[in-house]
Amino acid sequence: MKKNELMQYSCPLGKAMAALGSKWKPIIVLVIKDRKLRFGELAVRINVISRKVLTDQLREMEADGLVIREEFKELPPRVEYSLTEKGLALLPILYQLEEWETKYHVYDPEKEKDCKMIMESKKIQKIVI
C-alpha cells in the first residue's frame, strides 16, 4: 500500500506509518534531535544516504509536519532543519524502539554490521548520531 493510499484511511497507526514509512525518516529524526542542522551537516552525519534521497525525505517530512525548513536569504544560500513539536514527540518512541531491539535482538557478528559503522567499498564511514 502506498503512502497516499494509507493517508486516505482514518486509522491513526496507518497515518503514522505513512509519515514514517521510509527507512530514512526515523534516522533523520534521531539525527536532528532537538537542534538545528544545515543540510550539509545532515548529509555528513548520514553519509550512506544520497543527497537526492535526503532532499526528498526532508520535503516529505516537512509536508507531514515533522520538520521545519528555515531558509536564509544570503549568499551562499543557507537552509536549516529542526523538528516540529510533532517531530520532537517521536523521539521517546524511537528511543523505545531502540531499547526494544536491543533487548530482543541476538547479535551475530558474522552476519551483521554494527549500526554505527557501515562498510562502503574499502572505506569505513561512520554514522554520527
Image: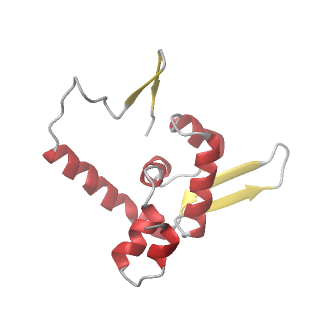
Residue 119 lies, in percent from the top left, at: 42, 24
Left/right placement of residue 59 relative to residue 33 reads: right
Q: Residue at x 49, y 68 (%)?
A: 3
Confirm whether residue 38 shows in the render: no
Specify whether residue 78 is in view: yes
Q: Could you say which quadrant of the image residue 96 lies in?
A: bottom left
Residue placed most toward the observer, 91 or 46: 46
At a point 56% along the width and 55% down the height, the residue shown is 57
Q: Could you tell me residue 13's position as x and y percent?
A: 34, 74
Judge from the rendering whether residue 79 lies leftward or rightward of residue 90; answer left or right.
right
- The answer to which of 105 and 80 lies nearer the viewer is 105
Which residue is rendered at x = 36% and y = 78% of the image?
12
- Taking the view exactly as shown, the residue that stands out farthest to the top is 122
The answer to which quarter of the image holds residue 114 is top left
Q: Identify the residue shown where x is 40% and y is 85%.
A: 10
Outermost residue to the bottom: 10
Q: Quadrant of the C terminus?
A: top left
Q: Quadrant of residue 72?
A: bottom right
The percent coordinates of residue 1 (x first, y second) are 43, 68
Front residue of 113/28: it is 113
What residue occupies the far right of the structure in this picture? Answer: 75
Q: Is residue 18 above or below residue 111?
A: below
- Position of 113 with respect to 77 (left or right) is left
Q: Position of residue 42 (x, y in %)?
A: 57, 43
